[in-house]
Image (cartoon, rainbow, N blue to C red):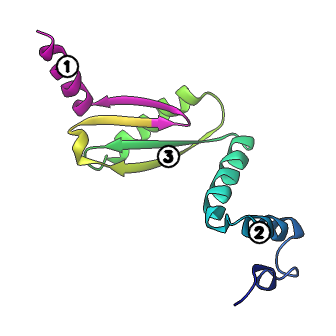
Amino acid sequence: MWQIGTVLDENKISHITRNLFLTLSANGKIGEAGKVIGEYAELMAAKRGVVHAVIISAEALKKEAVESVKKAVTAMAGKGTVEVELKVDPSIVGGLQIMVGDKFLDLSVHSRIADLSKSLEGV
């Protein structure tokens, strides 16, 4: 059985990275390394002024639509650069869902139908 310390060569990675992985391993959390790396990447992006946005549509958006939505998201985010990730989810029927940081804007047809259904149940 190998130990993580023997795999992490100090000549190839920094001592800080090595200590992080050794600590995660010693605490039985080495499986969480991906989450730690993801959160660190998010913090570094925020420090550089990069905002991550996810745009979900029912079908693939045309280039013009992507640019238009990106422009709106950039205005919404304020200053900085916006990294856009496009996803397709046919279950939203139409419209868009936009996630910017911890903010979620649901402009989908699915959510409108759900709202209407709730309203009609009360009648």
Q: Residue at x 66, y 63 (%)?
A: 33
The residues bearing labels 2 and 3 have C-alpha atoms spaced at a distance of: 37 Å
Q: Nearer the viewer, mark 3 or mark 1?
A: 1
Give how far across and how far down residue 39 sits, in percent: 66, 51
Mark 3 nearby-residue class (10 Å; few <14, some 14–19, many ≥20): many
According to the image, label 2 marks what residue?
A: 26
Precedes in sequence: disc 2 or disc 3: 2
Name the amino acid, label 3: Val
Give how far across and how far down residue 29 sits, in percent: 67, 63
Q: Residue at x 20, y 39 (%)?
A: 93
Q: Nearer the viewer, residue 39 or 63?
A: 39
Q: Nearer the viewer, residue 1 or 47?
A: 1
Q: Is residue 101 above or below residue 39?
A: above
According to the image, label 1 marks what residue?
A: 118
What range is drawn magenta here?
A: 99-123
Give how far across and how far down residue 31 sits, in percent: 61, 66
Precedes in sequence: disc 2 or disc 1: 2
According to the image, label 3 marks what residue?
A: 84
Q: Quadrant of the C terminus?
A: top left
Where disc 3 sits, the SS reads strand
Precedes in sequence: disc 3 or disc 1: 3
Q: Is residue 75 above or below residue 87?
A: above
Give how far across and how far down residue 72 sits, in percent: 47, 30
